[in-house]
Image (cartoon, rainbow, N blue to C red):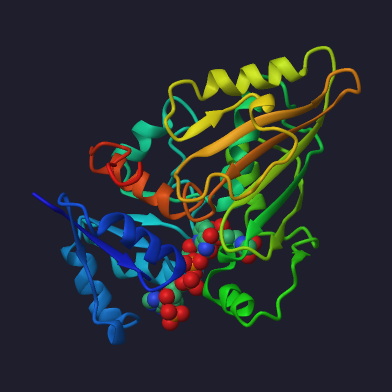
């Protein structure tokens, strides 16, 4: 039997990439709308009614409307938007977050897919808080760079006009929409300072967390805490810094669903930076949505995510 999946917003950046990962699979049947009716509530309601899973790849307000359209239906939902990431009726879709998270996703009616920056930040912070290597009330600063596809069709259009800057910082008013989920899912009680930026390249992201070292928090304990937490995970890899070299390239994980973590710094100087590299449209969005869908349907979690033979 093929499971029926409706991607609401399949013409957008995230939706298109989910479609590419699903359309060649025999175990999945995609429900498509006539492009002219893609925003028509009754056409979307009919598609949800037929689907086993609906994947929302919409702006936040449209995602909330889509949830309302499915009231009373059996269809399960994965929401790629920010709308439900700190809503406790929704399960947070980062399977590697804890020992229980994967099982909760498997059983969930509603799964919120994490934000791209949030995935990188939470992947670093949550295990280190759990290991006691970051205090929950520590004043953290998170810095990040994303490719411009992270801003969806609008930012892609700006860069395709070729008038866009090589690099810009933004969100420095500290209202970035990912901060609440980083706090809740990362286990922080004090708001971190978050400084994202965009580079003139399409896809790929690096998220950095600078940390002071001390007798307990060393380069070794940081690496080991992360390596222990993510042992045996296919899609989060902890790599020794000397295997990466002195330059971190945000595009290194492009085209994969892998998030790579590494700890850089100098024990004697007492400063370190923990870095996550991921594809903002892979583990940061579309790949994560497919991973969550696989878990919810009790399929091979990596189906469609390991390249041509996946
Ligand atoms: N891009 C990224 O790296 C990531 C994005 N996300 C989130 O995923 C969601 C989608 O983002 P992204 O794909 O980048 O955005 P895009 O702007 O590229 O795509 C959004 C799509 O939604 C469609 N849409 C808007 N309103 C409605 C509506 N009322 N009914 C049906 N369709 C509608 C748009 O239609 P139209 O074609 O007419 O514009 C567009 O095709 C957002 O919430 C985003 O924040 C999450 C993680 C990473
Ligand atoms: C480069 C860029 O603009 N990125 C987006 C985040 C992309 C993303 O993860 O969006 P969601 O939070 O909706 O999931 C931003 O900073 O708003």
Kindly indicate the quadrant of the structure image that contains residue 186. Answer: top right
> Which corner quadrant of the image does residue 192 belong to?
top right
The front one of 228 and 106 is: 228
Q: Which residue extends farthest left? A: 1
In the image, taking residue 108 as reference, residue 162 lies left or right, namely right
- Return the x and y of residue 23 as percentages of the image width and height: 24, 60
Residue shown at the point (42%, 55%) measured from the top left: 286
Q: Looking at the image, is 93 positioned above or below residue 58?
A: above
Q: Residue 47's quadrant in the figure?
A: bottom left
Image location of residue 69, percent across then percent down: 31, 70
Residue at the right extreme? 269
Question: How many numbered discs, if any?
Answer: 0
Residue drawn at x 22%, y 56% is: 24
Vertically, is 279 above or below 96? below
Q: Is residue 108 above or below residue 53?
A: above
In this view, the residue in front, 194 or 154, is: 154
Q: Which residue is at the front of the view, 93 or 302?
A: 302
Q: Is residue 68 visible?
A: yes
Residue 76 is at least partly visible in this image: no
Q: Is 232 left, or right, of 39 in this rendering?
A: right
Q: Give how far across and how far down residue 113 sits, in percent.
A: 45, 51
Q: Quadrant of the C terminus?
A: top left
Residue 7 on image: x %, y %? 31, 65
* Most distant residue in the bottom direction: 36
Residue positioned 41% across, 49% down in the render: 287
Compared to residue 244, the image places residue 173 above or below, namely below
- Image position of 294 (left or right of 15): left
């Amino acid at each position: 039997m093929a499971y029926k999946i409706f991607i609401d917003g399949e013409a957008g950046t995230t939706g298109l990439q989910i479609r590419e990962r699903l359309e060649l699979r025999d175990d999945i049947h995609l429900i498509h709308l006539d492009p002219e009716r893609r925003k028509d509530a009754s056409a979307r309601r009919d598609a949800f009614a037929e689907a086993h899973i609906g994947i929302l790849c919409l702006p936040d307000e449209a995602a909330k409307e889509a949830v309302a359209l499915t009231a009373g239906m059996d269809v399960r939902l994965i929401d790629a938007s920010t709308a439900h990431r700190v809503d406790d009726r929704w399960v947070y879709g980062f399977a590697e977050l804890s020992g229980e998270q994967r099982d909760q996703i498997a059983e969930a009616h509603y799964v919120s897919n994490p934000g791209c920056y949030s995935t990188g930040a939470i992947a670093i912070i949550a295990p280190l808080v759990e290991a006691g290597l970051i205090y929950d009330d520590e004043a953290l600063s998170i810095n990040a760079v994303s490719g411009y596809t992270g801003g969806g069709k609008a930012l892609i259009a700006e860069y395709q006009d070729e008038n866009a800057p090589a690099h810009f910082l933004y969100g420095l008013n500290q209202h970035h929409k990912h901060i609440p989920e980083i706090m809740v899912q990362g286990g922080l009680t004090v708001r971190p300072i978050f400084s994202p930026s965009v580079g003139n390249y399409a896809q790929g992201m690096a998220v950095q967390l600078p940390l002071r070292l001390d007798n307990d928090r060393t380069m070794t304990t940081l690496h080991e805490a992360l390596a222990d937490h993510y042992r045996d995970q296919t899609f989060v890899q902890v790599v020794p810094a000397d295997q990466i070299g002195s330059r971190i390239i945000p595009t290194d994980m492009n085209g994969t669903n892998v998030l790579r973590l590494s700890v850089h710094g100098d024990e004697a100087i007492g400063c370190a930076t923990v870095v996550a590299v991921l594809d903002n449209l892979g583990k940061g969005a579309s790949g994560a949505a497919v991973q969550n869908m696989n878990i919810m349907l009790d399929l091979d979690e990596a189906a469609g995510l390991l390249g041509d033979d996946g």
